[in-house]
Image (spheres, grey):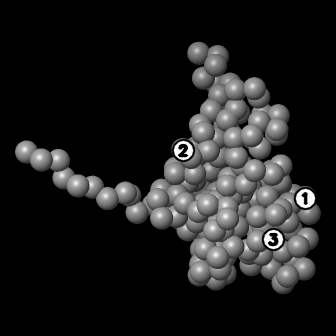
């Protein structure tokens, strides 16, 4: 019996090249929510936070640190555990996520400025006044929010647990 011809999964359409980002972000339903992070090992804390972020607007953009950018953050010589393409694909597969783009810089500021979202969001460990891009989003009439953690999860803690086994 012949194998069926399968098409790429629909979530792959949510993956965006940085050079296409401004145009793709402009097509999203508004208000657009923007968040960013490493998302090295996706866990319940991440997916809960992202689902809640999406509730704040009509679409959710997630910007992901490149592998080199993660390494420069000083999270450990063996980080990221998952390469960029895999981290982006997992995020794109989430129903709440509308678009996923990567950034190579140390901060997402340039990416934020390319779309100027209506709502900028980070997790509860970020005070609102420390969220990168917040000043610019506020100046453009948007809002900035820090979403409290519901689940005490972290990739670093998860890796420590795995290493101790």
Image quarter of residue 69? top right
Residue topped by disc 1: 130
Question: Disc 1 to disc 2, how far (Cα)?
Answer: 29 Å
Q: Which residue is mark 2?
A: 86
Marks 1/3: CA–CA distance: 16 Å
Given this view, does label 1 or label 3 mark the residue nearer the observer? Answer: 3
Front residue of 52/130: it is: 130
Residue at image mark 3: 113
> Where does the image place residue 7, in percent across and percent down from the top left?
32, 59
Spot the residue most to the top. 165
Q: Position of residue 79 (x, y in %)?
A: 70, 32
Q: Which mark is residue 88?
A: none
Q: Disc 1 vs disc 2: Cβ atoms closer than 8 Å?
A: no
Q: Quick one: SS at disc 3?
A: helix
- At 59% from the left and 55% from the top, the residue drawn is 48
Closer to the observer: label 1 or label 2? Answer: 2
Q: Is residue 86 visible?
A: yes
- Which badge, 1 or 3, is on the more N-terminal residue? 3
Residue at 64% across / 19% down in the picture? 163
- At 37% from the left edge and 57% from the top edge, which residue is drawn? 8
Q: Residue at x 19, y 52 (%)?
A: 4
Side of 139 relative to 69 (left or right): right
Whether tag 2 and tag 3 are in contact, CB under 8 A, the answer is no
The quadrant in which the C terminus is found is: top right
Q: Would residue 45 be found to the left or right of residue 75 on screen?
A: left
Image height of 42 relative to 57, above or below:
above
Q: Earlier in the sequence, mark 1 or mark 2?
A: 2
First-in-chain label (2 vs 3): 2
Q: Quadrant of the N terminus?
A: top left
């Amino acid at each position: 019996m012949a194998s069926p011809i399968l098409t790429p999964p629909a979530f792959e359409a949510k993956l965006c090249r940085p050079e296409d980002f401004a145009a793709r972000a402009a097509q999203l339903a508004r208000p657009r929510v923007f968040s960013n992070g490493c998302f090295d090992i996706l866990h319940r804390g991440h997916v809960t936070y992202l689902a809640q972020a999406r509730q704040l607007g009509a679409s959710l953009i997630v910007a992901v640190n490149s592998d080199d950018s993660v390494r420069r953050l000083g999270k450990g010589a063996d980080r990221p555990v998952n390469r960029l393409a895999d981290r982006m694909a997992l995020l794109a597969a989430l129903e709440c996520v509308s678009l996923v783009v990567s950034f190579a810089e140390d901060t997402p500021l340039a990416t934020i400025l390319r779309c100027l979202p209506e709502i900028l969001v980070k997790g509860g460990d970020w005070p609102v006044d420390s969220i990168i891009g917040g000043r610019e989003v506020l100046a453009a009439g948007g809002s900035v929010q820090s979403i409290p953690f519901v689940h005490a999860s972290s990739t670093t803690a998860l890796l420590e647990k795995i290493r101790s086994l």
